[in-house]
Structures are given as structure tokens and as C-alpha cells.
Image (cartoon, helix red, strand yellow):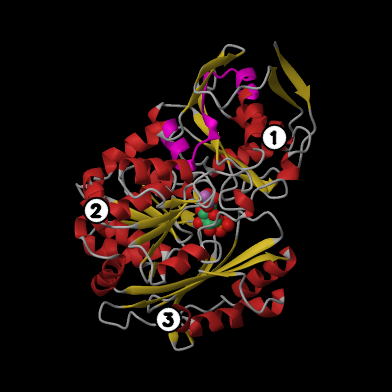
Amino acid sequence: MAIRTVETVPYPDQKPGTSGLRKRVPVFQQPNYVANFVQSYFDCLEGGAGKLLVIGGDGRFFNQEAIQIVLKMAAANGFGRVMVGQNGYLSTPAVSHLIRKNKALGGFILSASHNPGGPHGDFGIKYNVEHGGPAPESLTDAVFARSKVIDRYKIAEAPDVDLSAIGTSQIEGMAVEIVDPVDAYAAYMETLIDFGAVRLLFASGFRMRFDAMHAITGPYAKRIFEEMLGAPSGSVINAVPSPTFNDGHPDPNLVHAKPLYDLMMSASAPDFGAASDGDGDRNLIIGRNRFVTPSDSLAILAANAHLAPGYAGGIAGVARSMPTSSAADHVAEQLGIEIHETPTGWKFFANLLDAGRVTICGEESAGTGSNHVREKDGVWAVLLWLNILAARRESVDQIVVNHWKRFGRNYYTRHDFEEVEMEAAKAVMARFEGAFGGLAGQTLGGRTVSLADNFTYHDPIDGSTSANQGLRIVFADGSRIILRMSGTGTVGATLRLYVERFVGPDGDHELETQAALADLIALADDLAGIRELTGRDAPSVIT
Ligand code: VG1
Ligand code: CO
């Protein structure tokens, strides 16, 4: 066996997006494509020699092949030890936890999250740093620059490692440790959540349905909800990770998790429904006859987190991404804690969490998490909900309705226009921004504009600035219209329109969401020309 230096030529398209590099599988299968990207990271990272690297993915097509490449390259680049989930499985939050727990230098996550898999589906590679969270922009920018000039990479000539067998082997002196993907994560959850109370809840006849969508949370959910907490066998469905997600689309939204939604709205609904995405960092929460908007879920978790042992001392603050509704702001205000507004993407929460400024974070895209790891965490969010349900002994519906009575309701929707032509998407953004001049102070559709800008984030901890993070119009009454282009799509462009409107504690909380927001949605289309410029007369997905 030997270490080989392979000459290579750069691919110009290896720019990491919102969550790492995401492309179609055939793109990743091009010669040296994975190796170039991974070596670009190794070239930019300092102090890898002798260190630990964590590696795992969501089980999608090409997961194992990519892991073998990363393993052999890590050995050739001098790492001392790698920890890999059995069969190459690790959820994104579990990778984050293992990095932190074992003081690793970082880790590679092989996933394209909620995007479809299979030979013609999507694949992705993301690198997380020492604190367990996604690489900051300073690193991903450096890696992209490096990938454009890379001319060689190092790889060990070694046979493939058997990823199915727990235990330790070696590649060129580097220890390869295959670990159970669930053990450490499940033990950690037991320290944060009142498992005893949740066990009693299930023992009292409480019923849940968790849809793992043929993706990575299946093994975690089976172990934790059914084996440890006593949910009846069969509570977790679609629990075996499949390389193609059973030809499905592991996105827990109202289109792809429709069967769960339909069940929860039916006469045979259990008490609680939840789903997660491909890599296990998202969560969808649905009560019997009550869909919980992710932004509301964030606010409700923040308001009730103290009911769980891990947060019994209260929370320091809350952070939400800019397009996430302001529901969490109302909680922070009443609790007298900090609230922060960051750009889309979990990496922006890390500094605030590290500094102890915030405890709970979330995004409108079904992502909630806390200071326990540096990723959003789907199973954790479901567990915290269960803990709250066990402590309050109210239904999901009662908890939501009572939340609105205390804090008010932020009616909220997101409209996605997927696979739009890039030029058309840019034209929409340009037209919307073009309307911003002199808008502040004017009245639009009966509302006074207080702000119209392209969101720039100033990180209060490290002083860095991230510009161009989304166009927004904020009204004096708390309503907002936000437009941004997705950074995770792999075909064309995806436009996301986010609309919200606040109704105080005494207002009407039972309007139909789209109807409640209809005038703002129409105003957004007037200003941005979405339908005219894209030719689409309806969004691809409404959440
Ligand atoms: C989307 C979501 C964003 C999330 C990102 C990664 O990004 O809107 O909130 O952080 O996906 O989620 P974009 O750029 O397409 O809007 V996941 O579950 O990859 O890891
Ligand atoms: Co995800």
C-alpha cells in the first residue's frame, strides 16, 4: 500500500451553497470530482495531522462510494483517526454531536438533505468545523478559491473499508473506527429531555406517527421513540434508509409529507404527527387537526423549553433566520431575552451559540435546534415537543391556540417557485429591488413601509459582514414581504417568497392562512412581477 499523488484539473463549479456543495449525482461521479473538492478542504484546513475526522451521510445513492474516497484521502493527508457511522449512516445533527463530543477537527456530511436521491437525483458534501457546525463563509470561500486552481490530490491506495462492521481498522496508519450511528446521540438526548415523563405519556395511551421518509432518521426514531420511550411498534414508518428514498422526496413539507398531513386531519389521527428530512436536521410537527407552522414551532419551543431538563434554567436568547416569521420575537420580548436575526443557513447561528447569547435557534424551513449541537436537529425537536406535551398534558392544538392568545399570531406563508430560469429569477429580484427607492415612509396597500432593503448581517460576535441575504419590505404593523433566491437548488433557480402579518393576542387567530395574507401576496407579485417574468401562475410549493 502507498500514498499516491494524483494530478488533476479543476472543476469550476465547486462553490458551496447554503449547505455545502450540492449537485446531481452524475456531476459527483465525474473523474476526480469528489477528490478535488475534498482535497480543497484539506489544503485549506490547518492542523489536521494526527487529528480526528467524523464522516457520515444520509444513506443516499453514492454515499458509500464517496465515503471510501474521503477515508483514503484523509489517511493520505495525515489524519490520525476517522469515525464513521455504520453503513456510512449518520444524521447531520449526529455528526455535529460526534465532532463536539470527541473533539474532532471536523467532519464531512454526505447528503443533499431533502433533495431527491438515486442515480439521477442529488448528492452533496458539506464540511463542519470544530464546533460541530457548518464551515463559515471565510472557509467555504477559501475552499472555492482553492478548488479553482487545484492540480493534485493525495489518496491512499488501499482496499475499501467494510462499513458494515462495527470496530476499528487501519488505512496507512490512520485508525478507522466504525461506530453505531445512534448510540451516542440517543444517550445525549436522554440528558436533555425528560424521558421518564415521555414514557409515562406513551404509557397513558398517547399515540404518535413519525414518518422517517425512507431516510436517515429511521434508525434514530425507531430506537428512541419506540424502544426507549415506549411508543407502540409501528409508530415510526418508512424507517429503513433507502438509497433512492424509495423513489420519494424526503422533504417534510405539505407536498411530500402529504400522507402524514392527511392522516393528522382525518378521524383516525393519532395525537401527534412528525416527520424529518433526508439528513435528519428538519422537523415537521402536526397535531390532530392542527398544522404547526415551523416558525410557530420555533416560538412555542422557545416559550416552553424550560419544561425540559436540558433547559430547566431558562434560555439565554433566540435566533431566527431573517425570512422566519417574527413569532419568536414576541416570545423573546415577553421573556426579556435576546433575539437575533441572521441570514438563511445554520452556519450563522454558531457564533451566537458559542458565545452563549442564544439557546434556541430556528428557520422557517422546518429547522429548529439548540445549543446542544451546531446543526438543526429534527429528532431533538420532536423530543422537545413530546417533553412539552408530557409536561403540559394539553393537545398540540391547545398549545398552539394558547400560544397565540398569549403572544399573538404571525400569519405566515412561503411560496416556492422551483426550477425557474436563472435569468427570469434574476429579473424578478431586480424588479423587486428596483421598487425599493424612496419606499420607506410611503403607504402601500394601506400599510406604512418602515424599511425596504437587501438584508446585510453584521455578526455581533466576530464582526464579519454578510451582504445580499434577501430582499425585504418591512411594514410598521409588523407585516413583511421577503424575496430571495435559494442556495440549495441544483437545477435552474428557485425563488422563495415569504409573507407574514401579525395579529395581536386579542385578534382573530382562526383565519385561513392564504386568505389572511392574500393582499400582501398580491402586492408582492405587483412589485416583483413574479408571474409575469417567470410565466408561472402558481407556486410549486406553498407552506
Ligand atoms: C434551504 C432553507 C434554509 C436551510 C437550507 C438547508 O435553503 O431555506 O433555511 O438552512 O435549505 O437546509 P435555501 O437556500 O434553498 O433557501 V437542509 O435541511 O440542507 O440541510
Ligand atoms: Co436537511
Q: Position of residue 500 (x, y in %)?
A: 44, 74
Sequence-wise, which precedes: disc 3 or disc 1?
Answer: 1
Of badges 2 and 1, nearer the viewer stands 2
Q: Are marks 3 and 1 in contact (CB under 8 Å)?
A: no
- Residue 159: assigned label: none
Q: Which residue matches tag 2?
A: 201
Under tag 1, what secondary structure? helix
Q: Position of residue 97 (x, y in %)?
A: 41, 36
The amino acid type of the residue labelled 2 equals Leu
Under tag 2, what secondary structure? helix
Quick check: is the Cβ at mark 1 less than 8 Å away from ligand 1? Answer: no
**Inter-mark Cα distance, 2 to 1:** 46 Å
Q: Which residue matches tag 3?
A: 512
Does residue 176 appear anywhere in the picture?
yes
Quick check: is the Cβ at mark 2 less than 8 Å away from ligand 2? Answer: no
**Inter-mark Cα distance, 2 to 3:** 32 Å
Residue at image point 44% right, 31% down: 99
Q: Which residues are magenta?
A: 72-99
| Badge count | 3
- Residue 34: assigned label: 1
State the residue lying farthest toward the bottom: 446
The amino acid type of the residue labelled 1 equals Val
Under tag 3, what secondary structure? loop
